[in-house]
């Protein structure tokens, strides 16, 4: 027997420290507020302090998601954390550290690495686990702390990234929920966006990333909508990965969606990598109505990308 999986609760956490574009100029970076706004749409981002580790941000987002689902940590039967900035280079995973911080018993806990697509990759896998009947209530967190992985003298990358975490609790629902997901990867584009061991900073060919991203978003959304038996005109809310306002604007224009259906927070938080979609879900979900069609699209290093279509309850 198959089951349906839906989102039972959402939550997000962003660090307290606000870093404006002017703050970056004040750090001695050869850039300007106007350039950053015009090319990216970013006005500010949040920077994690020492205590705001990936585990800490994940735990805070998770507590809010559990509260909004009306569940306790002990109700979970799995924890998945999508991140490419874990606190330990290899292990233990962030998920196991979150498990102990929450007091979530001994449920399985593991990290998933798909860069900015991590949330959508997790949504796909966790949905299928719940549909199979093997798991009932899974905490999916997406968290990144990329501000500690940028070279602050590289003006093409240090302006882009911010830190944060978002979380959802996924569980069995009778109707609706996650009705389609479609994932892809093309490793031949690996070199255009990488985080090498040495030097341990993001290395990005911004123009190439921009082009690949623009080309994958619309086909991915159309593929997932078709799998769901829906069309663009059914979409109530569109939550793209917040990488660059121009990529997002291009996507809705090509799809023919009105601008007010798109959830945007890049102006305030910059590119928060895997966390950007669940932060958007957490911030916008108060406006969602039962039955609304919510489309989430992630894309990023690897190159990886994927779309999820959710029938909101
Ligand atoms: O999650 C995925 C993560 N990554 C992305 O999504 C990145 C996608 N790419 C982008 O967002 C854009 O390519 C950037 C915002 C990174 C760069 O914008 P662009 O319009 O593609 O600029 P560009 O790389 O073509 O550079 C144009 C000029 C260059 O100067 P010259 O060679 O024309 O004299 C750059 O050196 O802008 C210069 N530039 C800057 N100027 C002021 C690059 N970064 C900056 C800066 N401030 N921060």
Image (spheres, rainbow, N blue to C red):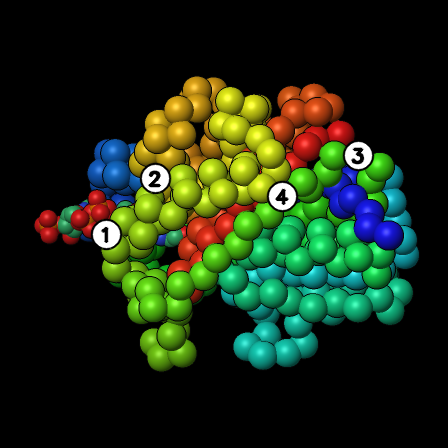
Q: Which mark is residue 66?
A: none
Viewer can see residue 305: yes
The alpha-carbon separation of the residues under discs 1 and 3 comes to: 42 Å
Q: Residue at x 75, y 58 (%)?
A: 129
Give the residue at mark 4.
Answer: 180
Task: Look at 35% across and 31% down and name the residue there.
Answer: 254
Toward the viewer: 230 or 166?
230
Which of the two labelled residues, at mark 3 and mark 4, occupies the earlier sequence position?
3
Q: CA distance from mark 2 to mark 3?
A: 33 Å
Residue 28 visible in the shown view: no
- 197 up-or-down from 54: above or below: below
Q: Quadrant of residue 94?
A: bottom right
- Under tag 3, what secondary structure? loop
Question: Which of the numbered marks, if any, corresponds to residue 175?
Answer: 3
The C terminus appears in which quarter of the rendering?
A: top right
**Mark with earlier residue (2, 1):** 1
Residue 247 has which mark? 2
């Amino acid at each position: 027997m198959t089951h349906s999986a839906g989102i039972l609760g959402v939550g997000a956490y962003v660090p307290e420290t606000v870093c404006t574009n002017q703050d970056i100029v004040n750090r001695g970076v050869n850039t300007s507020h106007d350039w950053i706004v015009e090319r990216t749409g970013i006005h500010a981002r949040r920077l994690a302090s020492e205590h705001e580790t990936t585990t800490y941000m994940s735990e805070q987002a998770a507590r809010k998601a559990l509260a909004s689902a009306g569940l306790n940590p002990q109700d979970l039967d799995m924890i998945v954390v999508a991140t490419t900035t874990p606190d330990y280079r290899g292990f233990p995973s962030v998920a196991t550290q979150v498990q102990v911080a929450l007091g979530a018993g001994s449920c399985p806990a593991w990290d998933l690495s798909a860069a900015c697509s991590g949330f959508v990759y997790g949504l796909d896998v966790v949905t299928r686990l719940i549909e199979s009947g093997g798991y009932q209530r899974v905490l999916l967190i997406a968290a990144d702390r990329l501000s500690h992985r940028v070279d602050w003298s590289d003006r093409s990358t240090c302006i882009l990234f911010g830190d944060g975490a978002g979380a959802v609790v996924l569980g069995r629902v009778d109707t609706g929920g996650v009705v389609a997901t479609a994932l892809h990867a093309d490793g031949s584009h690996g070199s255009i966006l990488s985080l090498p061991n040495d030097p341990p900073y993001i290395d990005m060919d911004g123009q190439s990333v921009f082009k690949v991203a623009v080309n994958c978003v619309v086909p991915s959304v159309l593929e997932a909508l078709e799998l769901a038996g829906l069309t663009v005109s059914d979409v109530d809310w569109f939550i793209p990965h917040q990488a660059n306002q121009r990529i997002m604007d291009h996507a809705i224009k090509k799809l023919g969606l009105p601008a007010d259906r798109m959830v945007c927070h890049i102006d305030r938080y910059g590119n928060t990598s895997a966390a950007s979609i669940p932060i958007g879900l957490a911030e916008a979900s108060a406006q969602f109505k039962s039955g609304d069609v919510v489309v989430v699209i992630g894309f990023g290093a690897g190159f990886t990308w994927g779309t999820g279509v959710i029938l909101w309850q």
